[in-house]
Image (tube, rainbow, N blue to C red):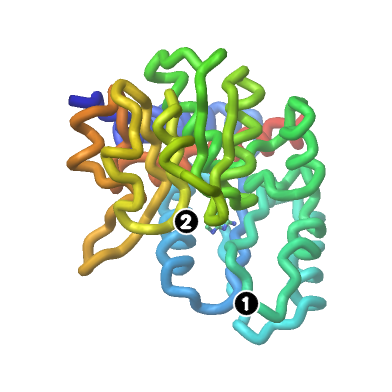
Amino acid sequence: MAELLSGKILSEQLTLKQKEKVAELKEKGIVPGLAVVFVGEDPASQIYVRNKGIACETIGIYSRTIRLDADCTQEKLTETIEDLNKDKQIHGILVQLPLPKHLDEQKTLATILPQKDVDGFHLINAGKLFTNQKGIVPCTPKGILFMLKDAGIDLAGKEAVIIGRSNIVGKPAAMLLLNENCTVTICHSKTKDLKEHTKRADILVAAIGKAKFVTADMVKPGSVVIDVGINRVDGKVVGDVDFEAVEKIASYITPVPGGVGKMTISMLMENTLEAACAQAL
Ligand code: GUN
């Protein structure tokens, strides 16, 4: 039976440390601040944005949510970000994705000052990750690496297989694991013989967005299985991995809920604190 990698427990431990860090910064006159820009009314995004606000409140970060109408112009969105770039109370800026279709995601992300880009989606931060330089790392991949390291899992030389090639998870996770000296394969919807790849994985990252997509026959016995999926099925949240079957053969597995999702928020708080410290210098 696999050991659980609990994002819930780990994020609770991080929350305590982050509270202390915020108190320390406040003594120096620094109040870390995070702005979340939310365009439109996507229901899943509503929940994420609310959770980010709650996390900030819990650890003492100043948070501001800027809501813009679904039909907001690119100019208005750009202007909003430029104001936040100049705002001394704000150390981190996050634009909730996806944006409504008429807005240009790349142009929007490029407007955020790289040092305030707590999502790590700006080309400068993506490029730093690509070239193994210190920058702001996207929250979900950073959370995955944190969990692996916390469990003492050796990464050098391991076969890491990632299913999913998104800019938010798949690609940055691949880069992080490559920087940790894993041998990395990125699989996606056009991959032939997916199972042939996943069966080789010592570390398998599932970031597909399909409920219970990864079945036991796709998993190497003794491997580490990281489930990034958040899917709603009959009112229940399930991951991209068939947990009940896969936990019987993996050595470690992340649950959903209580796994990677919790770490994503913790890492957003971490990135905001790091950004506040860097900007206070
Ligand atoms: N939408 C889904 N995941 C994310 C994320 O990590 N950051 C942002 N900004 N939007 C998202």
Is any part of residue 8 visible from this angle?
yes
Q: Which mark is residue 229?
A: none
Pick the front one: 25 or 151 = 151
**Residue 81 location, quadrant:** bottom right
Q: How many marks?
A: 2
Within 10 Å of disc 1 (Cα), the crowding (few <14, some 14-19, many 20+) is some
Question: Would you say 262 lies left or right of 3 here?
Answer: right
Query: Disc 2 residue type?
Result: Gly
Is any part of residue 26 visible from this angle?
no
Q: CA distance from mark 1 to mark 2?
A: 22 Å
Q: Quadrant of the N terminus?
A: top left
**Up/down of 106 relative to 279, above or below:** below
Q: Quadrant of the C terminus?
A: top right
Mark 1 Cβ inside 8 Å of ligand 1: no
**Up/down of 49 relative to 201, above or below:** below
x%, y% of residue 90? 68, 51
Pick the front one: 258 or 253 = 253
Pick the front one: 182 or 189 = 189
x%, y% of residue 24? 55, 27
Element class at badge 2: helix
Element class at badge 1: loop
Which residue lies under the disc numbered 1? 100
Give the residue displayed 79% in from the left and 29% down from the top: 131
Which residue lies under the disc numbered 2? 53
User: Which quarter holds ligand 1?
Assistant: bottom right
Farthest bottom residue in view: 71
Within 10 Å of disc 2 (Cα), the crowding (few <14, some 14-19, many 20+) is some
Give the residue displayed 81% in from the left and 42% down from the top: 124
x%, y% of residue 248? 19, 31
x%, y% of residue 135? 73, 33
Give the residue displayed 68% in from the left and 44% down from the top: 120
Query: Disc 1 residue type?
Result: Pro
